[in-house]
């Protein structure tokens, strides 16, 4: 085990993430045979197989998962060390790795840009994904600070409130319920919903919204991979959707979408910035957290007719 190198560990991480030798080789800038040799040497050093070779690709064994967890911690610590050393050498300089759920893509880039304008020596690297992938990135220390609608319960984090996050139900202007008032939850549940994929925070909120209607959460509706595709489908008259009010301001202003007057909506959530409890903040991280607390609410898009 003492002979294991950082190159071997990074090769293990790449093969685990991508599942194929050729894909890992392309990412690492190595030949496929060199990647295969690195995996074989790592397995020899650890004295056990790290991967099962399946027809669909490489799948980590139980031993492999333990090695991968350790390798992720080592890689994250080395990345943090590089940031720490840069901050020590050059006061006011460094990098913040910022993760944001896909619903936040409508304002997270502007927030990051404003921070970099105020702290000219600090670079923000933004990664956007659904809630599940952002939480995974946070837990694996691939991001320093994450922006989401609800802090994870299974990962120990510190949370910093950004502002209110209202969720509404939308339809095309020509929908039969577009001009209706006080639509009951039971009535709206009869509509065909267009929903985000599993792992999305918006989908989880819709499941909670329908929790008091037995069986409704088991058949939510047709899945889409992004808010943009959902908005386009709603505008085309394919159904209604439960969505963040921060994603639809332009379409509502242009009367391409309408917010339905449904009981118990808007569902009012909050936006939070979170970081791992056991993560020692670098000066750039501390500056970024302070910026979010102080000015983050300024970047939330305007919303219309919520009550």
Image (cartoon, rainbow, N blue to C red):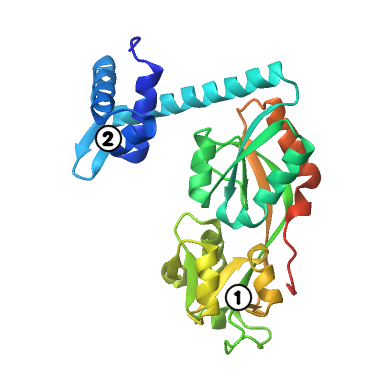
Task: Say whether residue 289 is left or right of residue 224.
Answer: right
Q: Residue 170 shows which numbered tag?
A: 1
Mark 2 surroundings within 10 Å by alpha-carbon count, few (fewer than 14), some (14 through 19), many (20 or more): many
Query: Residue lying farthest left?
Result: 55
Q: Nearer the viewer, residue 269 or 143?
A: 143
Q: Where residue 178 sits in the image (x, y, percent)?
A: 63, 85
Residue 15 appearing in the image:
no
For the C terminus, the image quarter is bottom right
Q: Where residue 141 sits in the image (x, y, percent)?
A: 53, 32
Task: Say whether residue 244 is left or right of residue 118.
Answer: left
For the N terminus, the image quarter is top left
Going from the N terminus, do you reach mark 1 or mark 2 first? 2
Marks 1 and 2 close (CB-CB < 8 Å) = no
Q: How many marks?
A: 2
Q: Where residue 122 sits in the image (x, y, percent)?
A: 70, 32
The answer to which quarter of the image holds residue 262 is: bottom right
């Amino acid at each position: 085990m003492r002979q294991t190198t950082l190159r071997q560990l990074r090769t293990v991480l790449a093969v685990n993430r991508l599942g194929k030798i050729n894909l890992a080789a392309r990412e690492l800038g190595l030949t496929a045979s060199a990647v295969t040799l690195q995996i074989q040497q790592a397995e020899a050093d650890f004295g056990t197989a790290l991967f099962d070779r399946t027809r669909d690709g490489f799948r980590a064994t139980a031993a492999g998962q333990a090695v991968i967890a350790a390798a992720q911690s080592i890689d994250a610590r080395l990345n943090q060390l590089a940031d720490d050393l840069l901050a020590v050498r050059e006061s006011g300089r460094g990098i913040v790795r910022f993760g944001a759920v896909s619903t936040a893509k409508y304002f997270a880039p502007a927030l990051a840009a404003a921070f970099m304008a105020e702290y000219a020596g600090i670079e923000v690297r933004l990664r956007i994904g659904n809630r599940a992938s952002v939480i995974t990135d946070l837990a694996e220390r691939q991001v320093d600070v994450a922006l989401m609608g609800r802090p994870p319960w299974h990962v120990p984090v510190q949370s910093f409130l950004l502002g209110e996050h209202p969720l509404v139900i939308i339809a095309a202007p020509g929908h039969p319920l577009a001009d209706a008032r006080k639509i009951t939850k039971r009535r709206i549940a009869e509509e065909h919903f267009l929903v985000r994929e599993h792992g999305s925070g918006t989908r989880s909120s819709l499941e909670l919204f329908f929790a008091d209607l037995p069986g409704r959460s088991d058949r939510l509706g047709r899945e889409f991979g992004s808010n943009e595709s959902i908005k386009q489908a709603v505008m085309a008259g394919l159904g209604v959707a439960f969505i963040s009010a921060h994603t639809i301001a332009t379409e509502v202003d242009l009367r391409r979408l309408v917010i339905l007057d449904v009981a118990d909506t808007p569902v009012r959530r909050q936006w939070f910035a979170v970081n791992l409890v056991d993560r020692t903040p670098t000066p750039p991280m501390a500056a970024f957290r302070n910026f979010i607390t102080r000015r983050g609410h300024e970047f939330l898009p305007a919303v219309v007719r919520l009550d």
